[in-house]
Amino acid sequence: MNNFIEELKWRGMIHDIMPGTEDEFNNGVTTAYIGFDPTADSLHVGSLVQIMTLVHLQKCGHKPIALVGGATGMVGDPSGKSQERNLLSEEVLEYNLKGVKKQLEQFLNFDSGNNKAELVNNYDWFKDMGFLEFIRDVGKHITVNYMMAKDSVKSRLETGMSFTEFSYQLVQGYDFWWLYTNKNCKVQLGGSDQWGNIVTGTELIRRKSGGEAFAVTTPLIKKADGTKFGKTEGGNVWLDKKKTSPYKFYQYWLNASDDDAANYIRIFTLLSKEEIEALEKEHAEAPHLRVLQKALANDITIRVHSKEDLEMAEKASSILFGKSTTEDLQSLDEDTLLSVFEGVPQTTISKDDIKCSLVDFLSDSTDGLIFPSKGEARRMLKGGGVSINKSKVEPQQAEEPLEIELLQDKYILVQKGKKNYYLVVVE
């Protein structure tokens, strides 16, 4: 059995740890849990830190519990939030929970062994509990002074905080107490913004049951340039390929700075210390080859998506940034094709509009989007500066009828010069 805390330490994954926690893990198989917020039907890369914490926990022989907050999702956690969020209906939460469970099953073993992972939903133990029962059995153990001292509360006192949000730490504390009592769960893990809520749980266990429980938090990840981790211009980077395509997911990691890549490769991959140090040495000798970023992007894309998705993402990347062929382009599925060329100028034409010469197609058929005039199109063709579907057009083809095999039966990709792409949709 590997030492779980030592594993987290060398990976830079410990922010706070309660005294006695390491001894607890060294005493045999320990059960620990992390809560996941079901506000969407997919987790995003921000959740990967917590997923990887559970992965390391299980690999070190301990038992992970993933708690999805069906009840707490109806309340809203104030930690790190500047305003109260919208509450979700039971139906939406149920749908979201299914999506989250499916993603967690990609990383954790829920099927076999004495340390197989478990998924629990706190709605199961809150749904039959009345308000009077809650304030009598939970509220009486924690003082208002104790709750007011928490940073998540103090930071919101000036702008205002509802009683619903104020009581959140009691609800999360009760989760820990319930798991401690019913699942022998001794440790709660989470992001550093959860420290206050987690400690409320250990305090409730001490006061209500006279027991001892422990806590470990991971640092909140920040990018070296100060921008928020897991965010792009298009918003969150999701684990669901329908929300963030494997190509964009792959590019997110590939585009990490050297400093970030050195940090991420420890946190998000299962590579050993020796493997990572060897990669860092190789990277230092030739930083332009981006060895670290490639190893990082490959590892995470395969584990979140699949080897096939990685190969598609690599092929798609070479189409934009390297040498590629018409066959490479034709092999992309429609989602990847649209993902790669999202943002490039597009126009839609009819099938009749391609029954013309190449020069007419590049100017008139596309309403001047690619070339404003036939003369300009001819000049560029003469200089060999036009490619269609990654196939270079020869000057003598200018006046010939356009003969082209459509991509996915509906797209034509035109490249003007080295960097100007146009996507023509044929309907």
Image (tube, helix red, strand yellow):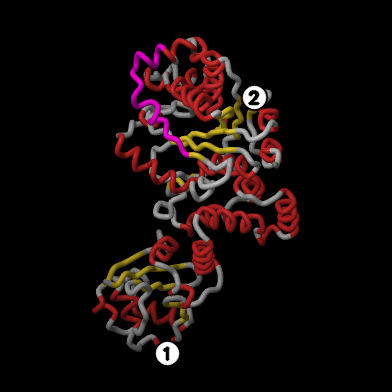
Nearer to the camera, 423 or 409: 409
**Quadrant of the snapshot with the C terminus:** bottom left
Q: What is the distance, in whole Å, between disc 1 and disc 2 at their CAs?
A: 75 Å
Circle nearer the N terminus (1, 2): 2
Residue named by callout 2: 18
- Write the residue at 44% across / 57% down: 245
Seen in the picture, residue 107 relative to 286 is either above or below; the reply is above
Nearer to the camera, 204 or 157: 204
Seen in the picture, residue 274 relative to 3 is either above or below; the reply is below
- Write the residue at 31% across / 80% down: 360
Amino acid type of the residue tagged 1 in the rendering? Gln
Is residue 124 on the magenta stretch?
A: yes
Where residue 8 appears, as percent x and y from the top left, is 66, 39
How packed mark 2 is, by other alpha carbons closer than 10 Å (few <14, some 14-19, many 20 or more), is: some
Q: Is residue 423 visible in this depiction of the protein?
A: yes
- Write the residue at 52% across / 74% down: 324
Amino acid type of the residue tagged 2 in the rendering? Met
Where residue 128 appears, as percent x and y from the top left, is 34, 24
Residue named by callout 1: 396
Tell whether label 2 touches label 1 (CB within 8 Å).
Answer: no
Q: Where are the magenta residues, as a range?
A: 119-136
- Disc 1 secondary structure class: helix
